[in-house]
Each structure stands twice: as structure tokens, then as C-alpha cells.
Image (cartoon, rainbow, N blue to C red):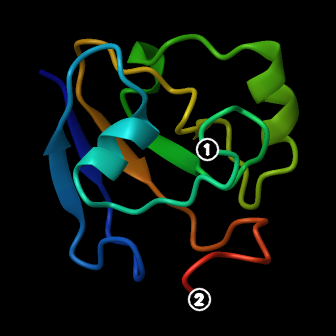
Amino acid sequence: MPVIRILPHAEYCPEGATVQAPRGVSVCEALLENGIEIEHACEMSCACTTCHVVVKEGFESLGEMDEAEEDLLDRAWGLTPTSRLSCQAILSDRDVTIEIPKYSINHAREKH
């Protein structure tokens, strides 16, 4: 089972975290199932950028990006060449390391 290493994020996981997830699930699903409440305003339907992550290691091992994800990523805060929408980044057999950006474009977050 692949491992996702999450770099420290002040709100979601201040100490950082490491979670295991089955092959074939999205990074977003894996984080949520392991208690890391990453934003996902569109309920993982590839309609926003609130679940944007930067893949620090293992980018090539994630499922291919489709045109809808590429178009949406242009609107993400802190976009990098290894940015992905975590709801669309499907795990394979390799481990990945991700960083959750400090900000998102979601100005009306729940629970805040």
C-alpha cells in the first residue's frame, strides 16, 4: 500500500503526517479517511481548486492529469509545475510526499 507523507501545515496537520492508502484512491480521499480535513468545496467533482496540493515526491506515479484538471489548476493559489488537485490525483504503487498550500481560493470556508 502506498504511503502519503504530508508536510506540516499549520491548520490541517501541524506536525505533518504519514498515512497509508490503497492503490486507486485519490489523495483527497486518503487524507479525509485518515482525519486530515483538507478543503474540498466541490465534493471532489473537479469543479474548484480548494484541494490543491503540491507533490514534492512521486509526481510521476500519480494518474495522468486530464484537461479539466489542467484548466482548473490555472486558478489555484501557489501553482507549481508539480501541482495537482488532490481529488484527481490517483495513487499507484509508489509513495508520494505532498504539501498543502497555505491558502486556497475558497473565501467562504465551512467551520471558520
User: Where in the figure is residue 9, as x and y percent of width and height?
Assistant: 39, 73
Q: Mark 1 and mark 2: span between their CA atoms? A: 18 Å
Q: Helix, strand or loop at disc 1?
A: loop
Q: Name the residue under label 2.
A: 112
Residue at (59, 52) in percent of width and height: 40
- Is residue 21 left or right of 82 when viewed as pictured? left
- Give, as a three-letter code, the residue at label 2: His
Q: In which quarter of the image is the N terminus?
A: top left
Q: Label 2's element? A: loop
- Asked if residue 7 lies left or right of residue 19, the reply is right
Amino acid at circle 1: Glu
* Dot 1 and dot 2 residues touching (CB under 8 Å): no
List x then y, in percent, for residue 29.
39, 38
Location of residue 40 with respect to 62 vertically, above or below: below
State the residue lying farthest toward the bottom: 112
Q: Residues within 10 Å of mark 1 (few under 14, many from 20)?
A: few
Badge number at residue 43:
1
At horizontal 20% and vertical 31% (from top left) the residue drawn is 21
Locate residue 20: give its quadrant. Answer: top left
Q: In this view, does 43 lie above or below 1?
A: below
Q: Quadrant of residue 2?
A: top left
Q: In this view, does 70 lie to the left or right of 2?
A: right
Callout 2 crowding tier (Cα within 10 Å): few <14, some 14–19, many ≥20: few
**N-term mark: 1 or 2:** 1
Position of 83 relative to 36 (above/below): above
Q: Is residue 100 left or right of residue 74?
A: left
The answer to which image quadrant residue 50 occupies is bottom right
